[in-house]
Structure formats: structure tokens, C-alpha cells
Image: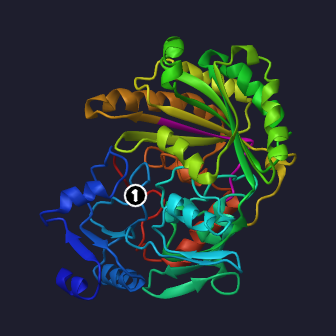
Amino acid sequence: MEVKALQSCVEGKVTTATDAGYENLRRELIWNQLTPARYPQLVVQVATEHDVVEAVRFARANRLKIAVRGGGHSWVGFALRDDSLLLDLGRLTQVSIDHAARTAAIQPAVTARDLNRRLAAQGLAFPVGHCPTVSLSGFLLNGGLGWNFNGWKPACFSIEAAHVVTADGNLVVANEQQNADLLWAIRGAGPGFFGIVTQYVLKLYPVPGAITTSNYYYPLQCATEVGAWAASIAGRLPKEGELTIFFAPAPPTLAERCRSSNGFVCIVSATAFVDTKSEATAALGLLESCPVAHTCLEKELNRPTPIDALFDLGNMLWPERHRYLADTLWSNSPPATVLGTLREHFLRAPSAKSLAVFAFSTGAEGNTAPLPDEAFSMTARALLLCYAIWERPEDDAANAAWHRETITALDPFAVGHYVGESDIVADAARAQRSFANANWQRLQALRQQYDPEGLFHGHFSALKL
């Protein structure tokens, strides 16, 4: 295997498992500090689209399977695969905006915050992810449940075209006119996509004129009552609104009052992506109707929150340089029942930094509106995301046991999962359960068509934590 030959024909950097800086690089490529014990044979940090083509051809010639890193935010570290070529796209960060056409051509490692700032300067927006440091590539491939996902829909549906390097080492364009089946798969296939996207062309939206947020802090003990009430108003909110219940660390002002709930608080947060203050006030006024409003510990009402300000919440909830376990489920079960079960586990969580997110479908149609025919095909009335978050390696066992027990207790409420944040390493069946059956079968057929020799890792090649 002529690694020097590969280095001579790419502008980026090639690192082998025997190089001095390998281990530091391996760890730096994963955002989660709970780094899996998996060791690629080569890491290619590409600098250009041409580098991607050369790396794929090299891997094919040398019978190396390929794993791809966009921004390294995969909770389970899919980019780290034993004895593979890890293709790191982290240097591909170019953005080109066509204001008249309302489109943006972006490379895969552009982050949510960077794209939003560029767009906002021109009065445009895109349903970027809630965490500002997430790169767009993995986010889009997983479906992209970003800001205003009820109104703008999952971000993958706003992909209009893409450049793709296929398993045979060719660079092709995928759009509605050519390679349309590749575009279908890009819209939600997740980490099992059978190619490498080097550019996305995205449909953009006007920035809403009055993005506004209200937050209500309730004792964790009130979660069941709050959950039942929130479900009753979700359909009355505009579809251009997010309604979410968080189990989160109590802010310093409420820490003493939340000692009895293990340091956690129940936050009801609603954001209206509307054009006028009066629309926002009317929509968010529904949150005053909670039957246990007298127990509310603190309120933040009708705060102007452009998307860049909303990212501040993401920074608080998902802190950097921490250890994470994550899993998700789509659910049609009564929110009070789900949240009651979740509460019992948070009352004994070993880390006070852990987090749960329960996001409702909003608008009159809610989840009854049919999805476009794309790979992304799993939805329900609510999405639950549960994270164990801690700092010290010596706390790994306790947090892993707690997270596993919590997810096991929640699984009976699941109708499916969100492939982007489900632990399909621990449970491979979660990958298939992230898609409608017909869509999963089509993905497997397309994978066989485009990558018959299995050059790219699938959703769940044999992995270890």
C-alpha cells in the first residue's frame, strides 16, 4: 500500500496509525470525549473535492473500507472504524449564496452557526441544527431536525442537489433530473449512505420578522401534568412554532429550589417563527393556560430570539469537552406517561448535567401531514431525545448503566427512532426502525446498486464502544 503515493496526489494530509500524531488526531476528530476504542488504519484530511476522489480510488485499489467524518458530532463516533480509511471532510467549509435564487451551495463541514450568520446578513434562513457547532453534512444526511422543523420541515427536504463521490471513484451530480435516486437517499439515509457528499445545494427561506421565545420553569415533580397540558395545546400553536419540554440542569437562580429533584428542572419552551410581534404574542400566550401555572418557578416571556441567539441555549444544554451517551425515540404515547417514566430516572441520574428533550409536533395537521417520498420517513406526535452527560472517566460505568436503564424503560413507548442520534451501535435494529419499511428496503437495494462491494461502511458494521 503506497501511502506516499496517496499523499503526493492530494492537497490535504495523510496520517497513518504508526505516525507520531495519530492518537491525538484520532481523539480530536470526535466531539464526544467518550472516544470509542476503534482505530482507523489511515486518516485523510482532505482539502479539496479532488482529494475525496483520489482517496476513494486509493481505498478501492487497496481494499480498505471507508468511513466518513463531517464534523465529528456523531455521538457514537461512526467515523472511527477499525482498519479503515477515515476520510475527514473537516476542511471543506466553503459557502456560496445566491440571494436571487434563494439557494446556497455549501461544503459538508460548514457549521450551523456559520451558515446561519452568513444567511442572516442577507435576510435569509435555513433550518440549521439546534447545536451551533454541528456541521451540516451529517445533520442533513440524518434528516436534519433543525430550528422550525415543523414549519420548514426537516432540513433534508430542502436539499435541491448535491455533488457525490461514488464507490467507483467518480464525481456525479444528484438532483431531480439526474441520479435522482441518489438524491432520494441523501435526504435522510443517515450514516449508512453509500457515497460521499462534497457539496449540497440548499433551498433557503426568508428570515421570519419576529422570532420569539417564552420559557417556563416548573418543578420536575409537575412533569406529568405539564406534559398532558402541552400535548393539548400543541395543535393550537402555529406550525411555525416549536414546543419542547426539557429536563435540564436547573439554572443557578433555581438551584436551591430544585435540590429535591436531583438538581433538575422541567422547562416548557416555545419559539414562534413568525413575522410580527403580535403574531408571536398571540401564539405564545397559549402557554399561560397551564393548569399548574401556580407552581411555575420562573418565566421568561416573549423574548426576541434570532436564530443566533437561540444557539446560546444549545451551547448551554450540550456543553463541549464532555462525555455523552445519547438515544432517541419517536412516540405516539401519552406525553404524561412518557415524561412520568423519564422523571423517575432523572431523579436518580448520577450526573446533574444530563438532559432530556421532548419535542412536540405542532400545527393543526401535526404529524398527520404526509412526508415527501424520501429516505427520511419516520415521524410521530413527539420526539424524545435522552442524553447522559458527564465529565470524568471514572464516572463512565455509573452513567452508562443509568442511560441504558432509562432507555430500556422508555423503549415500550417507541414507534421508531431518529437515526442521527440513536445508539445503533448498542442496538443495530434501531437503524431499520428509523425508517418506514419500504424506504429501508429501497435503501438496501440502492446500496447494493451503488456500492456492491461494500466499500463504504453501512449503518451498523460490527462496532464496539
| Image-based side of 457 in relation to 331, left or right | left
Q: Is residue 50 above or below residue 236?
A: below
Q: Quadrant of residue 361?
A: top right
Q: Give the residues drawn in magenta, as a range.
A: 374-387
Residue hosting label 1: 72
Q: Is residue 445 above or below residue 231?
A: below
Quarter of the image with the N terminus is bottom left
Are there few (<14), some (14-19), or many (20+) residues within 10 Å of tag 1? many
Whether residue 295 is in magenta: the answer is: no
Q: Where in the figure is residue 430, as x and y percent of width and height?
A: 55, 48
Q: Secondary structure at mark 1?
A: loop
Name the residue at 52% across, 58% down: 113
Name the residue at 78% across, 37% down: 284
Q: Where in the figure is residue 219, as x and y percent of width and height?
A: 61, 17
Q: Where in the figure is residue 32, as x and y percent of width and height?
A: 37, 47
| Image-based side of 96 in relation to 16, left or right | right
Q: Is residue 105 visible?
A: yes
Q: Say which amino acid is labelled 1.
A: Gly
Name the residue at 57% across, 42% down: 328
From the viewer's side, name the closer residue of 65 and 300: 300
Task: Give the mark count.
Answer: 1
